[in-house]
Amino acid sequence: MLAKTSTRSKPKRKEIPSALEIKSRVKENTLTIMECEDALRDLFLAAQLEVTLPDTTLSRLAVVREERTGLLLCGGRFQIFNKEKTAVPVLPCTSWVATLLAQEAHKANHEEIAGTLLRMRRKAWVVRGQKLAQKIVDNCVTCRRLKSRRCQQIMSDFQSERITPAKPFEYTTVDLFGPYEVKGYVRKKVKLKVWGIVFCCMSSRAMHTDLVSDQSAKASC
């Protein structure tokens, strides 16, 4: 019997989009500046609707409501509103949007409370914003690491051998340094390793140096 030959369908190649199609797709999936501003305005409006600000705060900050969006805007305590001057929305300090603004303002340059608060007020006026800025600055890991105090080393007391009168080199410390490669005493072509040894008197601080051929205790005697 003849075996049946199985025919497999070859996969079709996908068409490579042109440059114009790629640009059009990118434009469709990219948010515009107007869309980002509208989204931020909606977040501010939602934060204002969650909390009712007291009348004393509104009157002190000279807050007005924008007719088109319904946002509560503040131009500062000493500004009189007109068409030429800009205003920023008022936000409660308990809203999550205010916390995100404070974190963004602080991470820009890791400034102190005043600098962080000034950057926050470029986008919104947060009620009790100084308290929120202080909380963000205190919880910043980078600022904590930069402001941390270094450990102060406390030196220990002198040993009794250092302050007790004694003969020279009665109490001695030893140290090695090296190794160094030198030529052999007999065979000049042979290279040997030697170490320098330092004897230091603990009472007079006198020093004596010598050469040793190895690191054993017998060689240092």
Image (cartoon, helix red, strand yellow):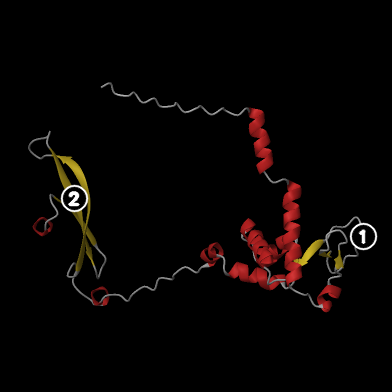
Q: Is residue 42 visible?
A: yes
Residue identified by numbered label 2: 195
Which element is circle 1 on? Answer: loop
Whole-percent x and y of residue 81?
90, 63
Which element is circle 2 on? Answer: strand
Q: 114 or 55, which lies in front? A: 55
* Label at residue 181: none
Q: 183 or 64, which lies in front? A: 64
Q: Residue at x 53, y 66 (%)?
A: 144
Q: Residue at x 24, y 63 (%)?
A: 206
Q: Residue at x 86, y 74 (%)?
A: 59
On the picture, is 82 further left or further right than 6? right
Residue type (three-letter) at the residue carrying disc 2: Trp
Whole-percent x and y of residue 95?
68, 69
Residue type (three-letter) at the residue carrying disc 1: Asn
Q: 179 or 73, which lies in front? A: 73
Q: Quadrant of residue 84?
A: bottom right
**Callout 1 crowding tier (Cα within 10 Å): few <14, some 14–19, many ≥20:** few
On the picture, is 176 further left or further right than 42? left
Residue identified by numbered label 1: 82
